[in-house]
Amino acid sequence: MYDIESAYMRFLGRCHIEHAALKAVLFDMDGVLFDSMKNHTLAWYETISGMGIPCVREEFYQYEGATGKGTIDHIYQRTYGRDATDHEVEYIYGEKSRRFNELGEAEPMPGAKEMLTEVVRRGLIPVLVTGSGQRSLLDRLNRVYPGVFAPERMVTAFDVQRGKPDPEPYLKGLEKAGVKPFEAMVVENAPLGVRAGVVARIFTVAVNTGPIPDEQLRRAGANLLFPDMQSLAEHFCNLKF
Ligand code: CA
């Protein structure tokens, strides 16, 4: 059921590639390396509903992976029929970030450390690919997982024009790793993020660490789906290749 090797071989077959080896693993951050989505969705909900705009907390799981501006524009289009101005985006994202920081530090995702350790042990290149522009989380990444992500192997909101589901963040990640799409694996927890990995033509593994139905991750095109990071780490440690 969770055979990473077979799924990767099937993926290579569909790409008409006979010989390839995995060289890099591209990790999303929120909901993959940190159990931070509960806090993100609450911060968004409080910020947007506090402005008198009707919304529900659960919908913010659907926008996960988009940039702050992408999420705010979506809400503005629905409510006012237009994108937010730069000034509005700056204010609202600032307010959301402030509330997020007040909620305290998100816990590391169980299983993430084991997964990263195995990636490093195998000599694979770990790359961070996040839509987040929150310095607090990026700093914490280096404290919780020291020495794993080299600064030149991190793609954040500051590096891309278009957020997920656009493939740009993952294409940048491949560039930073110096590998071809079929030599990498993406680890994602959100439908928009899975879509971005798939459109970038990378082998994309989904971990469903949140409340959204598995079906949404499958429909986004995930090559393989795990219920959490622990089970991914366990199966990854047992890989033969
Ligand atoms: Ca995520």
Image (cartoon, grey):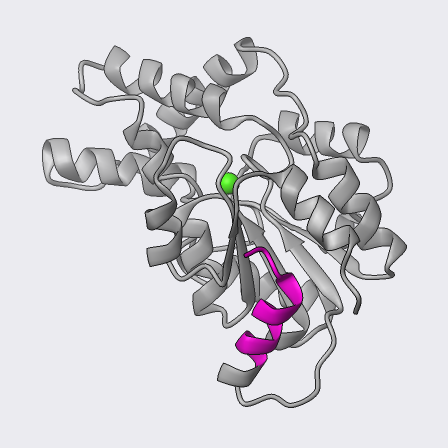
Which segment did they paint magenta? 1-12
Judge whether 117 appears above or below 167 on screen.
above
Give the camera-side residue of 232 and 56: 232
Q: Where is residue 70 in the image (x, y as percent from the top left)?
A: 34, 43
Q: Quadrant of the N terminus?
A: bottom right
The image shows residue 177, relative to residue 194, as above or below, that is below
139 relative to 187 in the view: left or right:
right
**Relative to residue 127, is residue 133 depicted above or below?**
above
Position of residue 83 measured from the top left corner of the image (x, y, whole percent): 22, 41
| Residue at the image position 54 percent from the left and 90 percent from the top | 16
Say whether residue 128 is magenta: no
The location of residue 108, given as percent across then percent down, is 68, 27
Depicted 186 relative to depicted 131: above or below = below
Nearest the viewer among 33 and 129 is 33
Quarter of image, res 106: top right
Q: Where is residue 85 in the image (x, y as percent from the top left)?
A: 27, 36
214 with respect to 226 (left or right): left
Q: Residue at x 57, y 38 (%)?
A: 228
Quadrant of image for the C terminus:
bottom right
Residue drawn at x 55%, y 35% as measured from the top left: 30
